[in-house]
Image: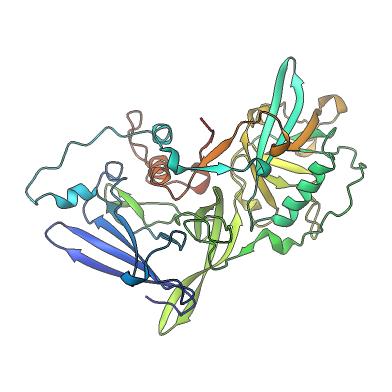
Amino acid sequence: METGAGGGWRSGRDSNPRYAFDVYSLSRRAPSTTRPPLRMSLIVSRNARDVNQAINQIALECRPLNAESGFRKGLGCGTLTLMKRIALVPLAALLMGAGEPPAPAKPALSPGEIVAAAPAADWAAIAPSDLMVMDLAPLGAKPRRVVIQLMPAPFSQGWVSNIRKLVAARWYDGVSVNRVQDNYVVQWGDASEKKALPEGLAVVPQSEYITTFKDGMFERFADDEGGHQIAHLLSDHEPSVDGKPTRFDDPYATNISFAGGFPVGLNFTMQHDRGNYVHVPNDVWPSHCYGMVGVGRNMPPDTGTGAELYTVIGHAPRHLDRNIALVGRVIEGIEHLSSLPRGTGALGFYESAEERVPILSVRMGNEVAGLPRYQYLFTESTSFAAYADARANRRDAFFIHPAGGADICNIPVPVRQVP
């Protein structure tokens, strides 16, 4: 399959009957003559069963199709990694003779153990200027701090810009947590709805709930203009369990993935090119997973300013995707919100001022002295691939039956303080 000159993919397959493995390749035509086409090769087994043993089985080779033109990091090595409906095997296994017994399997690691063992190179820094630090009134002598990472470009930037202006104006200082609805959301803002907003806030159209796919959005590495990463596509073509493909089916999107460490949904369209039908990404949007932060609004066409915010504290309300702006996620301190008493009014709103939890201050991370540095597990790293597989297929000692799949919200992106 091949797409037009603007950049696209073609795929091929070679088989080796002696070692029972296939080589699947994806080639991407460069969008300009100054960038050589790239090819990604994935060596896979046709009969491997233990994917955990095989998770580091990926032999990923990125090289220019024109060897003389050289390879430059950032051109998109691994761009839009399409997993095949097969299990991967260690490269060492490919080198063994057909009659040699396989090496004993190592004990399966839990997702937490995989994250703990991830090398420093697999972690990506979160800029302090992209963090919003919210200090609630203390509970007795115990401080209550919530740290929120704002959504990276190109998602929800009109609302994110408004939030930055609200923080700079100290508008959130003195507002309160007003709503705690069980298994749903915690919401905060001005309970009186009379506090004057700062000037210059944008009115963001509801079309901005969805981002249109642009060339370069699916780069493995940040591009030369500082674009954000998007990880491999999760679909029903992942490594298998007992010969069956791992399922990443999603009822809310054609495919699911991660952008800048955030969960996203994607839709594709079919385009006809040179006699072939080609799947082309069309719409991309953030997903309502646990801890995601959104903008409260009234009935459409109102989209909210960012003065009213909420975070998910229950089962992922994915039906809200593309209907409300998502602007970030809580990376630390969500227990200070999820453990609050539930509101007894309609939709979980508190019915008296005494129930509300005061917010003392909200500052950007680069304004807060002594704030720890944070990192997230880079979603195109080998460690994240192993982690995602382990979340979908628990093979550590406690589990009896691997689930064989996971939804996007059951693969929370790990975040840590910098050691």
Percent coordinates x, y for residue 170 in the rendering: 84, 39
Looking at the image, residue 290 sits to the left or right of residue 156; the answer is left
Q: Quadrant of residue 54?
A: top left
Q: Is residue 252 visible?
A: no
Task: Check the image and name the residue furthest to the left.
Answer: 99
Residue displayed at 54% across by 39% down = 375
Q: Which of the 4 quarters of the picture holds residue 68?
A: bottom left
Q: How many marks?
A: 0
What is the x, y in percent for residue 383? 40, 42
**Image coords of residue 288 (percent x, y):** 61, 48
Q: With 348 as the anchor, is 106 left or right in this view? A: left
Q: Quadrant of residue 313?
A: top right
Looking at the image, is 231 positioned above or below residue 116?
below
Residue drawn at x 22%, y 56% is: 46
Residue 174 percent across, percent down from the top left: 85, 32
- Seen at 79% across and 58% down, the residue is 300
Identify which residue is drawn at 76% across, 31% down: 343
Q: How is the image coloured?
A: rainbow
Identity of the residue furthest to the top in this view: 141
Image side of residue 101 versus residue 299, left or right = left
Tell me if 19 is positioned left or right of 311 in this view.
left
